[in-house]
Image (cartoon, helix red, strand yellow):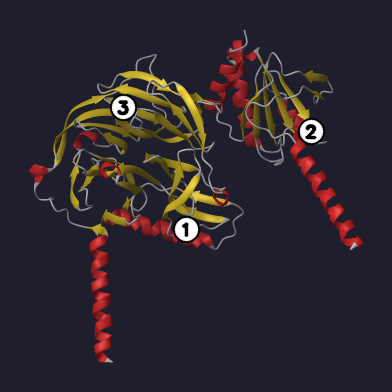
Amino acid sequence: MKKGLSIVFWVLLSSTGLFTQTDKLNQRAGILQNRKGEHISFRNFKKYSPKANEPAIGRAKRILIYDNKVFVLDERFHRLYVFDNEAHYLFTVGRPGQGPGDLEYPRDFLISDHGEIFILNSRGKQIEVFSPKGEFKKRLFLNIPKDYMYSRPTNIVLQNDSFYVGYHLSPSYVDEYNKAGDFKKNLYKRIKPIYIPGKNLANCSHMLVTDGGRTILHFDFFSGIFSKIQMNNSSILQFSTHVDKIEKYISRVNSNIQKNRNKKHSRVDSVFFHHWSDFCVDQKGHIYVFSLLSSQEKSPELFVFSTEGDFLYSTIVSYFKGKRIKLFACSADELFVFITEEEELFYTIKKGG
Amino acid sequence: MYTFRCRFVVFTLIIAVLSWGMSGEEILKYGIEIDPISSEDIHGQKFTIPFAGQVTFIYFFDSNIPHHLQKLSELDFYLTNLPAINQKIVILGISRDLSDKNSKKLNNFETNIYFIDDSDLSLSTKFKYECGQCIKILLIDAKQKLRLLTSEFNLLFLREVIQRYAEEIS
């Protein structure tokens, strides 16, 4: 009997060990925190200052660098702006409206290997496809499952002729669709249930294709958890760092939502909280993300992870003292582009890291 | 056996009638053609809106909700300050409750807005306005085509779309 129990104990212990090896959540100390010489820094900051006939950014939702051009999706003005790598405005893609090629609250976009631009029209649940020069080509309809009727698509990536779509509130964080826009399968399911009617924490997240197309990296702006999803077997590696202040906010928000759950609701409410900025992945596979919980007097803190999900270090970007970085993107040739909460667009060159 | 056949025939007939009714119902969607309407405004003036040759902005609202009136005044301010656009656009403000008390609130608008009391629900039915207490906006271009159908009043968005279709009219 004792022998049997000890076997069960060792099996349980070893399986726990396996799980801790897989997930790397709440990493407190960065592996390279004390090796300051290996930390990233930035030089040659340049700010985009629009001329009279050039657009000012209203509410940037996504930023991407592709083929020496910087693409900024503006949800407020319902357009995609294209800049060169020297902060000069080039042209605009799309216009407000509901017709083919028109944009209505666009939330995300992607650029295919051929340079085609796919813009996710969140309100209309459509994808508008444009040529690399911004000419409208076609409209695709996302056939979202009927039981997601309260949900809007907010994220999109394209890999191996499949779209991977995330939503603001749905039973699944990521679903797979074929290239015609038909639903194929759930890829990454939401852990907490959705209450209909009721108050729910929205899925505030973004995703990118990483590791040469083998994985999708999903990042939750609320919890700060990265989830790396393997395309071939759907296994998921989760990793995050631990920031005391953010953990306190997370538990406070969760308990508030839990309290409100018992109240009578007449509709589906979704509340959004962003404790973290958007993220970017450089050519080495390093993952960068800013904490948004910095006070007005402080400079934003940049957290860096390895491609395997190890927390490497955090560093202060003193140039942005008093500002918060909400979006940023990095290119293969060390260009970093930032957008602050005040919708200012900054270009800079990476040094070190 | 006879009863069963009778029931079967009646059931099939009901399904056929229902499906015919449903398929005959026009669905409001981008690009459909809107037939002209005739109505009467709150001052008793009869008019016909042909839709062709003008941009028509239809605003369904509840006159008891101050927020709905505030949005209408934002639109009024925008159009008043753009006379070139103003001359090409017709605005219909339709509410289910435009009694005398509520009508007084609508006297201050400077743009030509036709306010219609739709207490008989004829226009609400035509334009599938079922909510009654929410905003619904339709924009019909000079070719009588529906170009916008939304429940969100976003003046930045509306301004650009209205301006684009108004500029198409030579």
Residue B92 at x, y percent in the picture: 71, 25
Q: Chain of mark 2?
A: B
Disc 3 to disc 2, C-alpha distance:
50 Å
Q: Which mark is residue A257?
A: 1
- Packing grade of label 2 (10 A; few <14, some 14-19, many >=20) is many
Query: Looking at the image, which is closer to me, A11 or A102?
Result: A11
Q: Amino acid at mark 3?
A: Val
Query: Looking at the image, which is closer to me, A294 or B118?
Result: B118
Q: Amino acid at mark 1?
A: Ile
Q: Which residue is mark 3?
A: A70
Q: Chain of mark 1?
A: A
Residue drawn 25% across the image and 83% down it: A7
Q: Chain of mark 3?
A: A
Quarter holding the N terminus of chain A?
bottom left
Q: Which residue is mark 2?
A: B118
Residue drawn 19% across the image and 37% down it: A318
Can see residue A190? yes
Disc 3 to disc 1, C-alpha distance:
38 Å
Pointers 2 and 1 in contact (C-beta within 8 Å): no
Q: Amino acid at mark 2?
A: Asp
- Label 2's element? loop
In the image, which is nearer the foreground, mark 3 or mark 1? 3
